Image: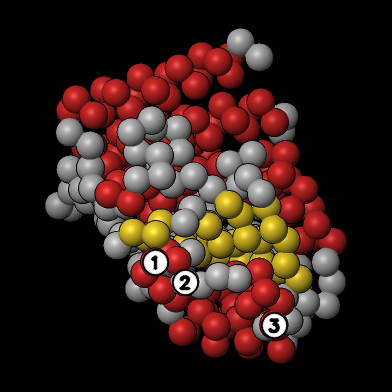
């Protein structure tokens, strides 16, 4: 798919995120918006998946380890055709299948229920090991938050993945620099992230702008070509990307916009969309 097309889809994903969180009156817009481009790249370009057959045996697997950014994940799944876009407005509503964290039992396309921070990567490592043991060709991708990697379980999983040379595993860290309590390096610095993964026998790719499709393509192509060790892609992103008043604001980690803020956010994203249409 052309870069411009991917950018347009990512902008639609961002509109979906804002719409869903506004309708829910709760949720996590900041980290969903920072990861909108990687969700789009994975589901529209990188992964072998089929919305008409979400459980096909040879599909690539994705685990959202930072499960609270479900609005971004759901928006990408809806744009890709796994379920109707209008259902996004039921996010977190009583009786909706789209709850605050991903649920593999009720949401088409979700391979793992997640939300307890640090656990998703462990499940992804297990999936990657299973593929190796069964001589299956599918690849496994997992997205972590940079605050999430303060959890010890992340490093146990990384140690195992490196030891078992799981080259069918790609660990992506959304390094937007902010978590619920503020800057990650003020709360409990995980830096240097790249050197840590290298120490656990990962091939590490640093992406200077994880909101840029060309840079994401280069990173995922390099990951696919890497043999004999798992890959960690550390991507610098902007928390709240695309919405002027949410960008780089820790306060938008986990709250919903009111009606006025929603209108402003959608206006911001409409402008982005118009600019892309003129390219």
- Real-space Cα separation, disc 3 to disc 1, in angstroms: 23 Å
Q: Nearer the viewer, residue 102 or 150?
A: 150
Residue 98 visible somewhere in the drawing: no
Mark 2, Cα crowd under 10 Å, few <14 / some 14-19 / many 20+, is: some
> As drawn, which residue projects farthest toward the top?
278
**Where 278 sits versus 185, above or below?**
above
- Real-space Cα separation, disc 1 to disc 2, in angstroms: 6 Å
Mark 3, Cα crowd under 10 Å, few <14 / some 14-19 / many 20+, is: few
Query: Which part of the image, by quadrant, shows the N terminus?
Result: top right
**Where 151 sits versus 72, above or below?**
below
From the top left corner, tell me how far across and down residue 263 is, in percent.
26, 22
**Where 50 sits versus 171, above or below?**
above
Which residue is painted at 30% across and 46% down in the image?
A: 252
Q: Quadrant of residue 265?
A: top left
Query: Which part of the image, by quadrant, shows the C terminus?
Result: top right
User: What residue did someone put label 2 on?
Assistant: 189
Using the image, tell me which numbered label, if any, was put on residue 115: none
Residue 33 visible somewhere in the drawing: yes
Cβ atoms under marks 1 and 2 closer than 8 Å: yes
> As drawn, which residue projects farthest toward the left?
94
Drawn side of residue 270 relative to residue 5, left or right:
left
User: What residue did someone put label 3 on?
Assistant: 199
Q: Nearer the viewer, mark 3 or mark 2?
A: 2
> As drawn, which residue projects farthest toward the front?
186
Using the image, tell me which numbered label, if any, was put on residue 186: 1
Q: Nearer the viewer, residue 52 or 78?
A: 78
Q: Quadrant of residue 4?
A: top right
Mark 1, Cα crowd under 10 Å, few <14 / some 14-19 / many 20+, is: few
């Amino acid at each position: 798919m052309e870069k411009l097309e991917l950018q347009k889809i990512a902008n639609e994903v961002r509109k979906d995120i804002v719409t869903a969180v506004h309708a829910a009156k709760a949720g996590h817009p900041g980290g969903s918006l920072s990861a909108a481009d990687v969700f789009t790249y994975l589901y529209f370009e990188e992964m072998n998946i089929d919305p008409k057959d979400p459980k096909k045996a040879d599909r690539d697997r994705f685990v959202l380890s930072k499960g609270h950014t479900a609005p971004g994940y759901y928006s990408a799944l809806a744009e890709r055709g796994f379920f109707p876009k209008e259902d996004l407005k039921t996010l977190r509503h009583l009786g909706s299948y789209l709850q605050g964290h991903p649920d593999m039992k009720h949401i088409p396309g979700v391979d793992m229920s997640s939300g307890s921070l640090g656990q998703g990567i462990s499940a992804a490592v297990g999936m990657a090991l299973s593929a190796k043991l069964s001589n299956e060709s599918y690849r496994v991708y997992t997205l972590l938050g940079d605050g999430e990697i303060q959890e010890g379980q992340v490093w146990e999983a990384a140690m195992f993945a490196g030891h078992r040379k799981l080259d069918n595993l790609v660990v992506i860290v959304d390094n937007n620099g902010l978590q619920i309590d503020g800057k990650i390096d003020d709360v409990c610095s995980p830096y240097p992230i790249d050197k840590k993964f290298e120490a656990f026998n990962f091939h590490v790719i640093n992406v200077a702008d994880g909101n840029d499709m060309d840079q994401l393509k280069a990173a995922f192509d390099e990951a696919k070509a890497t043999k004999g060790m798992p890959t960690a892609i550390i991507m610098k992103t902007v928390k709240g990307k695309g919405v002027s008043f949410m960008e780089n604001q820790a306060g938008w980690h986990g709250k919903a916009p009111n009606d006025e803020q929603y209108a402003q956010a959608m206006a911001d994203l409409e402008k982005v969309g118009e600019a892309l249409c003129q390219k």
